[in-house]
Image: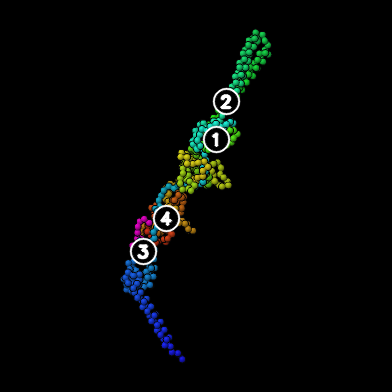
Amino acid sequence: MRRAPHPGERGRIAAGWLIGLGLLVAVGLGLWWASEPGRPLAGWRPGAPASQDGAAGPGPRSSRAGSAGGSRQGWQGGTGAQAPLVTVAEARRQDIRVTIDAIGSVVARRTAVVQPRVDGELLSLHFREGESVKAGQLLAKIDPVPFRIALAQAEAALARDQAQLASARRDLERFRGLLAKDAIARQQVDNQQALADQLDATVRAGKALVDEARLQLSYTEVTAPIGGVAGLRRLDPGNRVRASDTEGIVTIVQVMPVDVVFSVPEAVLPRIRAARAAGRDMAVTLFDRDGLRQIAEGRLSTVDNAIDAATGSIRAKAEFANKDRSLFPNQFVNVRIEVDLLADRLTVPVAAVQRSNRGASLAVVLPDMTIASRPVETGERDRDWIEVSGQIEAGDKVVIDGAERVPAGASVRIAGQGTVQGAGAAQ
């Protein structure tokens, strides 16, 4: 038997119904206010006019259908504002320079360590560190006094020997006259002849000693054996120098012109030999350590006579004028050598080539502003351009940025040309 509700309980139930009814009324009023024209839900009210972007807004179902249709329209020929934006470049015919990059080291054309040839006290230096010197230029002076004394002694000894020789020759002439009169024996004449010859040899030896003393005296003035750039001095005036000192006084290097030694793969050797046989100079360009700034331009001068079996490469040498003295011996540089020149080849930017397991391809923008994928084969590369062959012609617009976001057949916009409608949009 069902129990009748208590009067207090009936009051609470009635109050709950009233509160729920009030909430429903409030929600309804809020939705009605928001659906007024110009409000956030202006297109939700049934029968409301279409919004500015063309959405009819009959309800959630119509909204989803419109969204899906708009998405498909954006890929398959919607308005130009909705088409993806891509960056393109034109394929063109140009010469391809086949280059090889390597790491090289600057080598001075000639290097000379200026060493003293005699022992003595260093009196003065006559060069500035880091400046150019000419061959034969005076660099340093060594105390010449001991060598002048030695020269004077050699000259005195020579004068003595010459006087003795002259006396012996006069006696020989007298002895020959007496022998003609049969006044002396022939043995005496022969002995005098031998004495004169002996003194003549002594005089020749004395002359050699004088020349040696003069030569030693000339060594007290140290001159530059080659022209070039003087380095830092290793001795100061007041120190004693020795001919046995291997470090020397200063080192001179010839850096105008200068050479760069580097290694290239042995596979490049046939091209190098062909170019040299044809008499064509092979250009060599140097870049800084980062490989960004060009330092100098020169030409290949020679290659080594054997391939390094350990590395499979061969050493080569390039010559540079280095008039601005920007290259220093033992400096490491990035080398780029032009081993061949391919004339009139069809090229595209390297960034346009797309690679996959099916090979290389290009995204080409057709005249109707749609994307088409063209398979190609790539060849030699010249910096930012690469040789291609296949379904591509000079003047075709290839996508270099944005192709990964656009499927084949979709309409696109080209950066820098404003909004352009594709063929699908026009239809």
Residue for point 65% across, 15% down: 192
Tell me the distance, in whole angstroms, between the alpha carbons under discs 3 and 2: 104 Å
Residue under label 3: 78
Say whether marks 4 and 3 touch (CB < 8 Å).
no
> Of marks 4 and 3, which one's residue comes earlier in the chain?
3
The magenta span reads 415-427
Q: Inspect the image, locate mark 4, and give the three-letter code of the amino acid beneath it.
A: Ile
Residue under label 4: 400
> Of marks 4 and 1, which one's residue comes earlier in the chain?
1
Q: Which residue, as the protein is rendered here, is positioned at the far bottom?
A: 1
Q: Nearer the viewer, mark 3 or mark 2?
A: 2
Which quadrant of the rendered structure holds the C terminus? bottom left
Residue for point 40% across, 82% down: 15
Crowd around label 3: few <14 · some 14–19 · many ≥20 (10 Å): many
Image coordinates for residue 37, horizontal then vertical, percent: 32, 70
Q: Give the number of the disc on residue 148.
A: 2
